[in-house]
Image: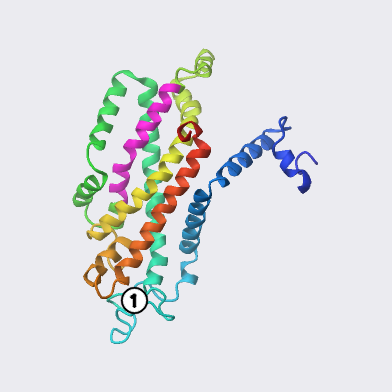
């Protein structure tokens, strides 16, 4: 019983034991070492705190936001009001509270990030591992297809897909996901080229494992850590691409409180009512920077050979 639940005074020694009594203890020990290495980077911790705050705002937006994000107040008295005690970040041209719209907009931002990651990452991982492991003409075809997507800037390619699919947040997510998978495929392929020559892969082959079992059971799990780092670093780019589409009117449609669309609505008031565009722009800057800081910290922990 004590081996499973050590006293608090000996918890650290239990986690750092060189002879763990179970896989559970070994896994917890590795996790503790990774967390300790992560916390040694204060900027990464700051990025994590900001990301957690973003998630907190998105979950509890109904309780945090003091006003409706889509319904404005009296246009005669509440339109384009500067930051004050009543409206912390001011109001826009429709007399809507900017702080409330930013809080609800965090939901849209997180949904876009989550959906793009869930769509693009498996595609890139599958294409890269199959290409790297099989090689030959399969590798040539898949990598040339990847090169075609990489030849175009992400925003330009996303604009082309959204123009074909039509404006809307759903089509924007699809367009961003379609343009986000090629870098993941390249990373997965590079990792697979090293893994497939390993001794343990040769041993698995001698045991009669099929190609599908080797790819899904051994190669893909070893590629995940590198992809987690890249996906985290790419989240800032996903935010900027979504904001760019929203700014051009091809992403989330009014009156949805999407940050890029809010900047577009406030560009006519940059001189006198600067807060209308500056506040959502600052939100994009802070959140994008936090994901980059978090990604740098995860790279140090999960991919030390690239960080040193």
Q: How is the rendered protein coloured?
A: rainbow
Q: Which residue in the structure is indicated by mark 1? A: 91
Mark 1 surroundings within 10 Å by alpha-carbon count, few (fewer than 14), some (14 through 19), many (20 or more): many
Q: Split into 4 quadrants, where in the image is the N terminus?
A: top right
Q: Is residue 281 above or below residue 154?
A: below
Q: Is residue 211 above or below residue 110?
A: above
Residue 201 percent coordinates (x, y): 50, 18
**What residue lies at 46% left-to-right and 59% top-to-bottom?**
54
Q: Is residue 276 above or below residue 127?
A: below
Residue 54 relative to residue 92: left or right:
right
**What residue lies at 31% left-to-right and 79% top-to-bottom?**
95
Residue 256 percent coordinates (x, y): 32, 66
Observer-nearest residue: 21 or 91?
91
Report whether residue 113 is seen: yes
Residue 251 percent coordinates (x, y): 27, 57
Place residue 12 in its image quadrant: top right
Observer-nearest residue: 246 or 170?
246
**What residue lies at 19% left-to-right and 49% top-to-bottom?**
164
Residue located farthest toward the right when viewing the structure as drawn = 2
Residue 306 percent coordinates (x, y): 45, 33
Look at the image and say whether residue 49 sits in the magenta stretch: no
Report whether residue 256 is seen: no
Look at the image and say whether residue 182 sits in the magenta stretch: yes
């Amino acid at each position: 019983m004590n081996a499973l639940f050590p006293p608090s005074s000996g918890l650290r020694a239990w986690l750092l034991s060189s002879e763990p009594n179970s896989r559970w203890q070994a896994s917890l020990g590795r996790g503790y070492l990774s967390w300790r290495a992560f916390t040694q980077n204060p900027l990464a911790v700051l990025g994590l705190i900001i990301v957690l705050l973003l998630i907190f705002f998105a979950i509890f937006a109904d309780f945090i936001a003091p006003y409706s994000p889509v319904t404005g107040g009296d246009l005669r008295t509440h339109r384009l009001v500067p930051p004050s005690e009543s409206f912390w970040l001011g109001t826009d041209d429709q007399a809507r509270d900017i702080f409330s719209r930013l809080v609800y907009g965090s939901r849209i931002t997180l949904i876009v990030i989550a959906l793009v990651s869930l769509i693009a990452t498996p595609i890139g991982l599958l294409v890269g591992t199959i290409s790297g492991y099989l090689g030959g003409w399969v590798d040539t075809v898949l990598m040339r297809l990847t090169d075609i997507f990489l030849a175009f800037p992400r925003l330009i390619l996303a604009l082309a897909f959204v123009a074909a699919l039509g404006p809307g947040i759903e089509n924007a997510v699809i367009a961003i996901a379609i343009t986000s998978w090629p870098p993941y495929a390249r990373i997965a392929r590079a990792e697979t080229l090293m893994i497939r020559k390993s001794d343990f892969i040769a041993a698995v082959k001698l045991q009669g494992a099929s190609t599908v079992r080797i790819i899904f059971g051994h190669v893909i799990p070893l590629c995940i850590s590198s992809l987690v780092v890249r996906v985290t670093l790419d989240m800032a780019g996903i935010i900027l691409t979504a904001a760019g589409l929203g700014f051009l009117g091809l992403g989330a449609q009014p009156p949805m409180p999407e940050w890029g669309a809010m900047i577009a609505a406030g560009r006519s008031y940059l001189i006198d009512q600067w807060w209308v565009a500056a506040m959502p722009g600052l939100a994009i800057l802070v959140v994008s920077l936090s994901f980059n800081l978090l990604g740098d910290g995860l790279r140090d922990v999960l991919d030390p050979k690239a960080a040193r």
